[in-house]
Amino acid sequence: MTLRYLPNAGRLYGPDFARDPQAVYAALRRQHGAVAPVEIAPGIEAHLVIGYQAAVDVLTNAGGVWSKNTSDWKVRLPDTPEAAAMIGMLGYRPNALFSDGAEHARYRRVISDCFGLIQPHKLRQMVIEISDSLIARFAAKGEADLAGDFARPIPLRIFNLLFGRPDSDSADLIEALSAMMEADGEAGARGTEAYGRYIGELIQAKYARRGDDLTSWFIDHPAGLDHEELVQTFVLVIAAAYEPTSSLISNTISRMVSDDRYYSSLTNGALSTYDALMEAVRVEPAMANYGPYVVRHPVHFHGTWIQPAELVLVSYAAANTEPAHVPEELRSDGGAYLGFGAGPHRCPASDPAMLIAMTAIERLTSHLCDLELTVPREELVWRPGPFHRSLAHLPVRFTPIRPDQPGESPWAVQPPSSSTLSAPISPARSAGYVTSAPWSS
Ligand code: HEM
């Protein structure tokens, strides 16, 4: 793509962006309006959609000009490690995120049908048990890094069970996914490669031996995805499940423990966990800028000419916080915000994601009711990367609690045993969390 914008482009990488992305969006808004030129890595340019109405127009495919198929963009990239890392995140793949129309509907149906088999009350019970077992590990210490000790392991443990993988895989998976999301040159490209290997092994294991788990349901779904389609669907769904859910949890907790309206809610109910979640989805959406689109023909869009094969990214974070769109009062219903996207590609798993985050946070705050940050919120360290808003660490302190304290403790409910977690066929089934798919024999 042309580099005509570069002198004016905002940078979505580097420590300044990670520290204060809203300052970058505000400067871009002042200079360019609803659509701004950005670099997502050195020399790799995109149009960032930062106006709320412009974002809705793209997401709902107003005028029928928008497409998710980024194949043409990909072939024009330079042969550099930065470009390879970006291809991992943005290059066309035969899955729901990068397809349109009937192709998209087919891929998406597999995801919606399979996630629809997870019963909310059983998922909630799973989150309670896993949260309690994690809280039990640090509750007596009086301090914790709630990003590493709580928010990251929660989706990992839950989705390992649901996808039918043992917890022994976790470290490799976290490392590969983090490198991919941070999309930083060679490390990002290596992360993409390692993640591809992980997915390949996951599918091979389930080809060999099916269980009552998401992986087997995807394989056997009547839509009949072929091997490559399955691989690319898992690449999307596993990354989408682990990374943003963990960021949603830590971003929300960081708001609750640093804002009196929430802090007091831990004891007197001023604003609820749900309010905090909605505020995080609005102001710091986990998938901050990960809305890749291209146009089918040249368009003049909210003041900017966009050519086919130029990359367009919807900034959910900037659109949600556009001053003209933001009401003065915090709304409990969250308003018409875009933290889970909108239109045909809206997150198909926002309900389970919210249920997981809400249950985990309520469990945490009901056990540890005087959580406080050990540093001012402005000093928290955020992970680099153009696409996400995710805390590197969330250091807190609290009054230690012990198993022998009166009242309910995190030890009252036993987590699934490690043998259950690593059972070969159907750990989620044997723990009573899922039943079989109607299409399995
Ligand atoms: C249970 C965990 C999650 C799963 C399995 C999941 C899965 C997915 C999938 C498969 C898509 C692509 C849908 C399509 O293109 O038709 C998607 C889109 C999206 N998800 Fe999620 N997601 C999860 C959690 C989250 C969370 C926590 C957030 C942010 C708070 C989020 C934000 C989004 C957004 C913004 C999109 C739209 C992307 C676009 O417009 O291209 N997701 N999600």
Image (tube, rainbow, N blue to C red):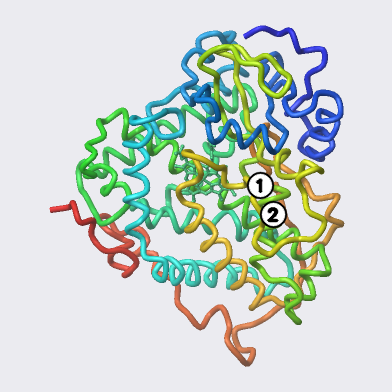
Residue 280 visible in this rendered orientation of the protein: yes
Q: Residue furthest bottom?
A: 406
Q: Nearer the viewer, residue 377 or 114?
A: 114
Identify the element where label 2 is drawn.
helix
Q: Position of residue 361 (x, y in %)?
A: 62, 67
Asked whether the viewer can see residue 172, the reply is no
Examine the rendered structure and indicate whether residue 140 appears above or below residue 341. Answer: below
Element carrying mark 1: loop
CA distance separating discs 1 and 2: 6 Å
Q: Please give the name of the residue rendered at 58% of the width and 87% of the height, measured from the top-left corner.
A: 408
Question: Which residue is the site of mark 2?
Answer: 280
Q: Quadrant of residue 139?
A: bottom right
Which amino acid, mark 1?
A: Pro
- The residue that appears at 66% across and 21% down in the rendered structure is 301
Above or below residue 299? Residue 68 is below
Ligand 1 near label 1 (Cβ, under 8 Å)? yes
- Of residues 72 and 83, the one drawn nearer to the viewer in this rendering: 72
Q: Amino acid at mark 2?
A: Ala
List the residue tagged with mark 1. 285
